Image: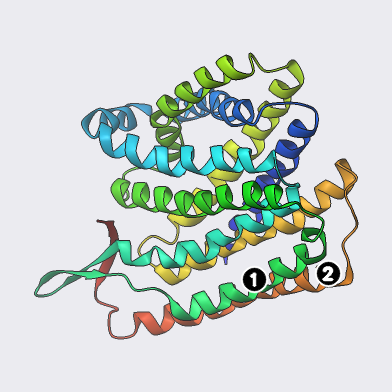
Amino acid sequence: MKAIALGILASFFFAVTFVLNRAMDLSGGSWIWSAVLRFAFMAPILLIIVMLRGNLRPLLSDMRQRPMIWLRWSTVGFGLFYAPLCFAAAYGPAWLVASMWQITIVAGSLLAPLFYRVILTKSGPEKIRSSIPVKGLALSLIILIGIVLIQLQQAQALTAKESLYGILPVLLAAFAYPLGNRKMMAACEHRFDAYQRVLGMTLASLPFWFILAALGVEQVGLPSSNQTMQSLIVALSSGVIATILFFSATDMTKGDVHKLSAVEATQSGEVIFALIGELVFLHGAYPTLWSYVGMGLVILGMILHSVFGQDLRTQRSVGTTQNKTRELGN
């Protein structure tokens, strides 16, 4: 339950991303700088935190030894996650982007076969490919039905371009984020805490952001002071607080696909928080009756994930209480 609570709290701070990214776009800011500035601000903040905790040296040593692993999965997990989200914010309201982002709940479950569980038995280690958590996936579909209901009426007012550019990039991001996160979590095993892993992935993704920043200077020039300040808020709220909370929650679920899927499902709370934020700060349209029904299904789905996720973990542990498992990437 602690991991679930951390996941829900993370979804609140993540929701700031959708609202402020939309606000920056409406005020004329470029999606490129919305993406780049978040990680530009995150890097020094996280660097100071990890240094004060005395955990910087082992992280940098591991990154020097395995640069391609860090570079590859950090670019996927951070670069191909956040850049498409900011692009989508330029073509759709915050509620649409936050709603479509919940596809990551299903994406996380579908990615399970890309990982192995190593079971340490009396006869030696046994490598088993993880399976798609079908029951957990069914619970996720309840949340997705709720998401559809939330955006049903509003979506009718969108143009084809808004639908295309506001949806497809988010689909890419929805798969990239859990893939990069899980691959790095498997590669790091138990050597680094959430602060170290977020810092490592931030530093390793900087080449991607340098390239995007150069593109931004060429196409739109430097960002405004207003966009810079809003990006700093996003970096602190979503980039530092929310990411560390979420990574801490996923660290608690290492090696357990069902429990990990339940934690990832808590991110559906972003829809509710983003909807409230858009109403309050961007003066968006009030929810319809179907939207309220949808939010009820989202909350129900999160509760079922929490309750039945525990049952699934209990069933999975029967007969294997003397075995130790861990999840590895391909």
Q: What label does residue 238 carry, if any?
A: none
Q: What label does residue 292 carry, if any?
A: 2
Between 52 and 244, the one lying in front of the other is 244
- The x and y percentages for residue 302 are 64, 70
Q: Residue drawn 42% across and 49% down?
A: 181
Q: Residue drawn 61% across and 78% down?
A: 304
Q: Amino acid at mark 1?
A: Ile
The answer to whether 308 is drawn above or below residue 179 in the figure is: below
Task: Give the labeled residue for mark 1.
Answer: 143
Between 204 and 193, the one lying in front of the other is 204
User: Number of numbered discs present?
Assistant: 2
Label 2 crowd (10 A; few <14 / some 14-19 / many >=20): some
The answer to whether 310 is drawn above or below residue 324 in the figure is: below
The answer to whether 285 is drawn above or below residue 69 in the figure is: below
Note whether residue 260 is visible: no
Can you tell which quarter of the image residue 125 is in? bottom left
Note whether residue 192 is visible: yes
Which residue is situated farthest in the front direction here?
Answer: 160
Left or right: residue 155 versus residue 123 is right
Left or right: residue 47 versus residue 154 is left
Between 190 and 329, the one lying in front of the other is 329
The answer to whether 116 is drawn above or below residue 63 in the figure is: below
Q: How is the image coloured?
A: rainbow
- The x and y percentages for residue 187 are 29, 48
Q: Amino acid at mark 2?
A: Tyr
- The x and y percentages for residue 235 are 62, 32
Quarter the C terminus occupies: bottom left
Left or right: residue 15 versus residue 1 is right
Left or right: residue 37 versus residue 276 is left
Q: Dot 2: what SS?
A: helix
